[in-house]
Image (cartoon, coloured by chain):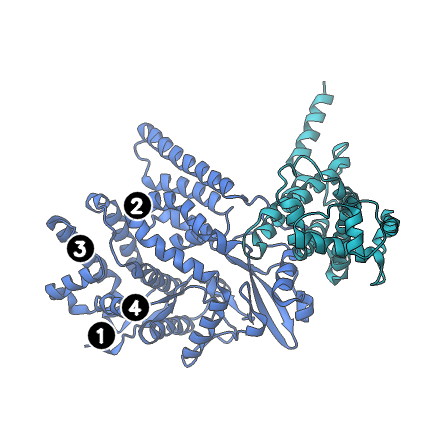
Amino acid sequence: MDSNMKEQESIPTSKVQRAAKFITTGAKVGGNYVKHYAKKVVNPSLTKEDLHNENAKDIYNSLSQLKGSALKVAQMMSMDKNILPRAYQDKFTMAQYSAPPLSYPLVVKTFQKHFGKTPDGMFDSFTKSAVNAASIGQVHQATLGKKKLAVKIQYPGVADSVSSDLKLVRPFALRLLNMSEKELDHYMEEVEEKLLEETDYELEVARSKEISAACGHIANLSFPSYYEEMSSSRIITMDWIDGQHIREWLANKNPSQEERNRVGQALWDFYHHQVHELKQVHADPHPGNFIIQDDGKLGIIDFGCVKVIPEDFYKGYFSLIKKDLMINEQELDQIFYGLEFISDRDTADEKLYFKSVFKEMISLLGKPFHVDSFDFANDDYFEQIFQLGDRISNDKMFKKSRQARGSRHGLYVNRTYFGIYNLLNQLQANISTTKPEWLKA
Amino acid sequence: MEKEVTKKTSKVDPKTKIVEGYMAYILEHGQEPASIFKFAKELKMKEEDFYNYYTSFEAIKSAVWEQLFDRTIVNVESQEVYTSYSSREKLLSFLFTWIEELKKNRSYLLVLYGSKKDLKGLLPSEVKVFKGMFKDFANEIILAGKETEEIADRPVITDRYDDALWLQVWFVFQFWLKDTSPAFEKTDAAIEKSVNLAFDLMGKSALDTFIDFAKFLYQQK
């Protein structure tokens, strides 16, 4: 039966062991650099890409044996495609799919703890092994009466280990993201806060209900119902959504351009409404959270990560997508200060450099907003973004700067938009890129 | 006398009264009664009557452990899925349920074992009966595991598997005593991970294949 379960075959247990795991990876990465330069002496044509490839492999191998927040960070890094060199990305994307499951007795125990009943006592049927593994929990399928349900169960101790896991990831993030410590702390706080929220399943149910009710009117979207009486701080019960993930859908159905546009537009409208009306957003747009149903509707699950967008950040951030903004130097300066892109601690040279960098980035990233409809199938556009990202992160001026740049709120909002762009690119969709009223003029 | 103790059916059974009285005493006073005489007096029993049931405090403590074991087994077996579990899952299920039983008596156990430093080396003598019962249980699972080939049958070593599993139970107990995480979630994680490790070690692995190969090479000489 399930003895197969590679269930946590060798998940490092204690913090010490986990730390050891990271140290070996660190050593390996260091070794890769040595190897790389040694090889380079012999064969000068060797590219950085090869090195990244090897590093990514080692880092991924160690991360995939960890669960919880470390995996979460890997996932996040895999989202921020423009920060991470290509080779890292590919490996990290794999992390979004695999994590070993919990044993069934522990599932039973968790149920007994929270409801005083076994899964069999609560549902008419309940799958013994997980049908789906997420980074901090796993999903079982259940039936009750005529209803097909998805039951998500959190790994024990995940909430406790968030902070210590993040400390372990730090040195890696430093190395990978080419950041100074200060810069990193600036963001780590935000990440920690969000990860802790993600372990709070009661909050997740409340938010899921709130957002899905507020977005219920949007065409071609569908949300599962959540069952509070069968949910707790470690368990969430919701409707099972039948359908396929975007990648499967594209491969199996070979959908027409029209169908792809429809799904893409639903996705766009969903985010438009959240960002501009609700000011809080489903900030985890990774492919696993979207399911395309047989009727072509886009099902949305997992509201574990919701970013509330503060009003003043919202104003500044989205002012940047105004097309003619670039002309008005003074207004731009003000926004840059507001979003902490530049500060008074910068030298005049730095100010000039970073202003030009950010201008370039913004005009590129804001492109879809400058037109009425945008074709996300345009791979050239994405190539440009990657190239710009690579170029900037390799620039001496950029590396030298010891300052944290960009408001912490930007972290999840950026991640969300990269995620959406990325999904729309996968869908090869042509989208009518709506903008809020105040930005239209 | 062990057999007698396990049969505690009626509620007014003097044995139950003694065990419960003893636990209550420990909980309230934080230590053992000074003597059987004093304790019997408190229970409004004659000392000589007392000896009909238990002859020492140790025997009472031993009975508490047996109770923990019995309740765990009853609880585990009442779950319908239990029979369909693999050996690995049976042990997990046992430990998770056992910890729940322990939880009900945590204060009592902490008084007796919380401050002992040499738990690792020296097994308190009152736990021995519990150990025996657990080993019987473990042998049952191991046998079933061998039949399904979940557990590899290795000469000599296999006979010690029950001891290995006992060490694990004792490890879990000590871990739990020191656990301060909410709802003892860390103990849950410790159980899950240690059992998986144990079964991965007991299962067929690269080591067996290696030994087989080494044997083959040796025989070629």
Residue that badge 3 annotates: A343
In the image, residue A209 sits, relative to residue A201, either above or below, namely below
Q: Secondary structure beneath disc 1?
A: helix
Please, what is the three-letter code of the amino acid marked with disc 1? Leu
User: What label does residue A439 carry, if any?
Assistant: 1
Q: Quadrant of the C terminus of chain A?
A: bottom left
User: What label does residue A310 carry, if any?
Assistant: 4
Q: Residue at x 73, y 60 (%)?
A: B81
Image mark 3: chain: A
Asked whether the beta carbons under mark 2 and mark 4 sit within 8 Å of each other, the answer is no
Image mark 1: chain: A
Marks 1 and 4 share the same chain = yes
Characterize the local packing of mark 3: few (<14), some (14-19) or many (20 or more) Cα atoms within 10 angstroms.
Answer: some
Q: Which of labels 1 and 2 is toward the front? A: 2
- How far is mark 1 from mark 4, CA to CA? 18 Å
Q: Secondary structure beneath disc 2?
A: helix
Question: In the shown orientation, is residue A1 left or right of residue A54?
Answer: right
The colour applied to the residues of chain A in this rendering is blue
Please, what is the three-letter code of the amino acid marked with disc 2? Glu
Whether residue A194 is visible: yes
The colour applied to the residues of chain B in this rendering is cyan
Question: In the shown orientation, is residue B55 left or right of residue B124?
Answer: right
Sequence-first disc among 3 and 2: 2
Marks 3 and 1 share the same chain = yes
Image mark 4: chain: A
Sequence-first disc among 1 and 4: 4
Residue B77 picture location, percent across and down: 77, 58
